[in-house]
């Protein structure tokens, strides 16, 4: 039957696309373990020397710690502020709330270059010296919609009467939130937080313009790239990749792809 | 019978006489309180920066200092000097090309997992999301290793005996810029298209086929119009992001593959001309939005 | 205005009602969900709120429960104004249509939830949950999770959870709507048994008139945000106050006509279709008033033309169709060009072939005259 053959065609298409998407990722991961000091074929054997070199680099370690700091602060901030906003959006329908939704998602559709230099202009204008903290603000701006959208989607699926039942049985608004609603949206929130961490860990452009001299991991790599190729960049890049891939796969355990796709 | 315990029905009172027991706080108060932190944050750190940035586009730079001159000089410069005009054109062509290629591939992918590989759609979608969040900078520079003179493709072709000299147009060219843009934009485009295709019900396509439409006819007349909002969203998003990108042209574009983003970034770096950079940024957005508006109007005509 | 919550206002001179609703209005945008509703639920009774879909039953229940706020009017529960109290501070509990069990908690944790909030000692919690599960006849299922329950079991657990705090008033919003017919019948009896056992006042929303008639002490019939009639099941069934009530509760033949003559106690009505005359208790109608004659199918008798039986009203007609419904038989008799009466007879009554001329007869006392609201604005 033609069904089987057309199935194959679709698989080829999907497979080719995925190959195209993951080829650069695979290349970086592979070369990070290559013993040779040029990033070209043929493969010279397995080695961890680039990882050793990376961790021996003081600036790299500082950048890694900065990345972790930024990710943690941004995740906590967006989790609290975003969950609260998601609640407001799920409670009632109104044109104002729709407007707010578009407002929250706006940073997602602006180029990060635009946001980065706009933020830099703003900080300069109000006399705020760029440092790691100002970079966190930029990260929060872009990642806030992830939390709002994902948590809101879960809340919308939650039967309102479950919450009303809790209130009816004597729970205060806070008790019904803590004992009933929060445990039920926690998986979605956790998934959203992992997405936020993945995005933050990978972010270059906004951070580059708004962190002053404080480098995160991608900013450090960016700086090294401009000074010529050093294979330990592959090891550093692999650390970013492994972190973000792990976070996203883990997020996939808590939220379905469809929820992210909206 | 228990009914004997019941009193007579109350006479129905005029409702206007009994006045209102409104709750002490208005119903929207909790909503406002829950929204307040996010709203405040966005007002300060989104509206504020965009406003300042817009204002800067009317300022000038004198002796390495920003001067609020309130002039149209920057816009004038951006719209008259050939170097900027050429960069705008190059940017719109490259970004437009990248967006179109991206959306075509993304549509095919989304279509495949939505209609033909349904059993695996959750897993395949997760892979797309992994790709979306796995490496922006890393991904771009990896392409240097793939496309360079010493890169994987050239080495493979040479060792297969297909070429003698490396194909040097692969890197530092418009082709390189386009390939790399498409590479990181595809996941971004798949998600809205997939979401839109989810809203196309199978019956709608089946009805069209039942009424004699060919597979392509059903796609063109039924599926695509129904999914068009998603497809257009993907097109718009990828076009804007491609047009505003500067890491790609910087790392793999060379001169022929350069784009306006690179120039804008340099006005905020070594060139130190923030007002000009601001004007170039807003002009880029305007051009992109105008083009997208034209596409929208045109597509609504065609897909009627 | 502005005084704190919990202000006590006694405004029910006829004695303390379990629920007293007065003049409640509620609008959603342009739709008026409730338009001046007043009702009382006497302590310890089972009151049904009955009406077609969209008439405002749920809205009224949610206002009493504290989930919506009325635009006007007042709500008192056992003499205490509760209008400004949040749901958790109102002495009522609600059983929701879709159970609303907490999916992440065990059955025990679900039922003990109100007790846990009040920090009742664990041992007492266990005893009272067991007691409640006995009451709803599901002993020993404490450790299960809500996902492991059938619909009927889930609804019993929801009931146990709503009752464990010993509310004096329980609100139920179509709690049986999601159950199949057989289970629904069984649960109706269960609910009534539990209500009588505990002496709790029940306000029970349903759009199933049969359910309301079998379960309740008192029926409140709603239509389009207003109360159309209230009374005991017998009253609303036997003496519908208007065409709506007559059509909604039980089944009725509704025949429009004009009052030809009346002496204050009985009236003669000329039917609009076919021109036959009908005698009925006057029920306050005036001469020449457009009315609707209402007769229940089971009050009609069908016999061959001319058979004597002492009924005042007799109309000739023709048998057109019959339907068997278990142990009763439903006959359709054409008495005018467009007018068909429905009668109900036992299966063992004398069979008459279709198409035969027959005579439909019934007693004047079983006839109800209702003002025709469609023709002149009364009521
Ligand atoms: N939150 C709301 N927003 C807008 N309109 C509403 C809302 N809740 C109820 N309504 C409207 O108010 C009217 C009464 O609704 P309600 O739910 O009280 O009806 P009901 O008698 O319970 O009907 P059903 O038997 O279908 O449950 C309907 O017209 C409904 O559309
Ligand atoms: Mg309802």
Image (cartoon, grey):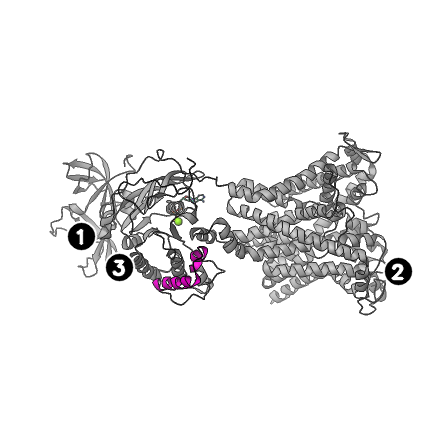
The numbered mark at residue C206 is: none
Q: Residues within 10 Å of mark 2 (few under 14, many from 20)?
A: few
Image quadrant, ligand 1: top left
**Label 3's element?**
strand
Question: Where in the figure is residue C105, as x and y percent of width and height?
Answer: 48, 61
Q: Is residue B164 left or right of residue B220?
A: right
Badge 3 is on which residue?
C324
The quarter holding residue C371 reads: top left
Mark 1 = which residue? Answer: C301
Q: Residue at x 71, y 47 (%)?
A: A133
Chain ID for label 2? B
Q: Counting other residues with Cα less than 10 Å from the Cα at mark 3, is it few (<14), some (14-19), or many (20 or more)?
A: few
**Residue furthest toward the front?**
C121
Q: Which residues are magenta?
A: C111-135
Q: Quadrant of residue B284?
A: top right
Question: Magenta: predominant secondary structure element?
Answer: helix
Residue B165: mark in rendering: 2
Q: Is residue B5 left or right of residue A234?
A: left
Comparing A240 with B297, the one in front is A240
């Amino acid at each position: 039957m033609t069904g089987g053959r057309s199935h194959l065609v679709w698989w080829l298409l999907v497979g080719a696309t995925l190959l195209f998407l993951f080829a650069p990722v695979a290349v970086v991961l592979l070369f990070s373990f290559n013993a040779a000091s040029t990033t070209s074929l043929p493969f010279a054997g397995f080695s961890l020397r680039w990882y050793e070199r990376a961790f021996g680099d003081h600036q790299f370690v500082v950048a890694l710690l900065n990345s972790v700091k930024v990710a943690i602060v941004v995740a906590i901030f967006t989790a609290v502020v975003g969950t609260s906003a998601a609640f407001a959006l799920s409670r009632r329908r109104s044109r104002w709330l729709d407007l707010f939704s578009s407002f929250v998602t706006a940073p997602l559709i602006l180029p990060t270059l635009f946001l980065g230099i706009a933020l830099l202009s703003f900080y300069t204008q109000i006399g705020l010296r760029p440092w790691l903290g100002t970079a966190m603000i930029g990260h929060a701006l872009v990642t806030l919609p992830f939390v709002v959208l994902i948590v809101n989607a879960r809340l919308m699926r939650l039967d309102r009467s479950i919450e009303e039942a809790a209130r009816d049985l004597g729970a205060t608004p806070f008790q019904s939130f803590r004992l009933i609603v929060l445990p039920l949206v926690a998986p979605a929130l956790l998934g959203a937080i992992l997405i936020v961490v993945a995005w933050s860990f990978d972010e270059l452009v906004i951070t580059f313009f708004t962190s002053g001299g404080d480098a995160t991991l991608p900013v450090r790599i960016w700086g090294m790239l401009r000074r010529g190729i050093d294979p330990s960049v592959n090891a550093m890049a692999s650390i970013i990749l492994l972190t973000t891939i792990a976070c996203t796969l883990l997020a996939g355990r808590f939220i379905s792809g469809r929820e992210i796709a909206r | 019978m228990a009914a004997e315990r019941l009193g007579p029905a109350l006479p129905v009172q005029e409702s206007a006489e009994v006045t209102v027991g409104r709750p002490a706080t208005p119903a929207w108060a909790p909503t406002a309180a829950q929204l307040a932190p996010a709203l405040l944050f966005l007002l300060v750190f989104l509206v504020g920066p965009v406003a300042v940035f817009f204002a800067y586009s009317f300022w000038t730079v004198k002796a390495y200092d920003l001067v609020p001159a309130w002039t149209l000089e920057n816009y004038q410069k951006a719209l008259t000097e050939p170097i900027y005009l050429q960069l705008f054109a190059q940017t719109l062509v490259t970004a437009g090309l990248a967006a179109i290629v991206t959306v075509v591939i993304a549509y095919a992918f989304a279509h495949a997992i939505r209609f033909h590989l349904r059993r695996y759609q959750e897993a395949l979608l997760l892979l797309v999301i992994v790709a979306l969040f796995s490496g922006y900078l890393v991904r771009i520079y990896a392409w240097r290793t793939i496309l360079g003179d010493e890169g994987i493709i050239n080495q493979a072709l040479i060792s297969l005996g297909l070429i003698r000299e490396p194909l040097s147009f692969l890197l530092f060219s418009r082709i390189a810029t386009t390939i790399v843009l498409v590479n990181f934009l595809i996941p971004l485009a798949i998600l809205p298209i997939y979401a839109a295709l989810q809203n196309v019900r199978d019956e709608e396509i089946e009805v069209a086929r039942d009424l004699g439409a060919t597979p392509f006819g059903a796609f063109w007349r039924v599926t695509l119009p129904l999914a068009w909002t998603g497809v257009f969203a993907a097109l718009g998003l990828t076009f804007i992001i491609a047009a505003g990108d500067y890491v790609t042209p910087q790392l793999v574009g060379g001169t022929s593959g350069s784009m306006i983003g690179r120039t804008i970034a340099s006005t905020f770096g070594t060139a130190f001309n923030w007002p000009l950079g601001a004007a170039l940024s807003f002009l880029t957005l305007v051009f992109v939005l105008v083009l997208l508006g034209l596409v929208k109007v045109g597509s609504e005509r065609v897909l009627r | 205005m502005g005084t704190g919550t919990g202000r006590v206002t006694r405004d029910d001179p006829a004695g303390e009602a379990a629920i007293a609703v007065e003049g409640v209005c509620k609008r959603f945008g342009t739709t008026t969900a409730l338009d001046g509703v007043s009702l009382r639920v006497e302590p310890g009774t089972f009151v049904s709120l009955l009406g077609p879909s969209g008439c405002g039953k749920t809205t009224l229940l949610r206002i009493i429960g504290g989930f919506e706020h009325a635009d006007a009017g007042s709500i008192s529960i056992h003499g205490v104004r509760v209008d400004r109290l949040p749901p958790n501070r109102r002495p009522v509990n609600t059983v929701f249509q879709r159970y609303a069990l907490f999916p992440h908690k065990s059955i025990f944790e679900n039922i003990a939830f109100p007790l846990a909030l009040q920090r009742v000692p664990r041992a007492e919690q266990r005893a009272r949950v067991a007691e409640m599960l006995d009451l709803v006849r599901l002993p020993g299922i404490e450790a299960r999770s809500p996902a492991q329950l059938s619909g009927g079991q889930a609804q019993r657990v929801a009931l146990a959870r709503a009752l464990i705090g010993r509310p004096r008033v329980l609100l139920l919003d179509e709690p049986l709507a999601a159950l199949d017919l057989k289970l629904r019948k069984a649960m109706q009896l269960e609910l009534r048994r539990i209500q009588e056992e505990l002496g709790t006042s029940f306000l029970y929303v349903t759009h199933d008139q049969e359910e309301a008639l079998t379960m309740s002490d008192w029926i409140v019939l709603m239509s389009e945000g207003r109360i159309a009639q209230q009374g005991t099941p017998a009253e609303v069934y036997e003496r519908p106050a208007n065409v709506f009530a007559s059509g909604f509760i039980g089944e009725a033949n509704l025949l429009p006509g004009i009052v030809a003559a009346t002496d204050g106690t009985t009236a003669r009505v000329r039917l609009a279709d076919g021109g036959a005359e009908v005698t009925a208790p006057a029920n306050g109608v005036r001469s020449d008033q457009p009315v609707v004659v209402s007769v229940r199918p089971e009050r009609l008798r069908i016999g061959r033309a001319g058979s004597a039986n002492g009924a005042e009203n007799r109309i000739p007609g023709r048998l057109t169709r019959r339907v068997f419904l278990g142990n009763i038989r439903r006959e359709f008799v054409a008495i005018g060009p467009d007018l068909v009466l429905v009668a109900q007879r036992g299966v063992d009554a004398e069979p008459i072939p279709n198409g035969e001329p027959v005579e439909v007869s019934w007693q004047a006392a079983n006839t109800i005259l209702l003002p025709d609201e469609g023709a002149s604005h009364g009521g």
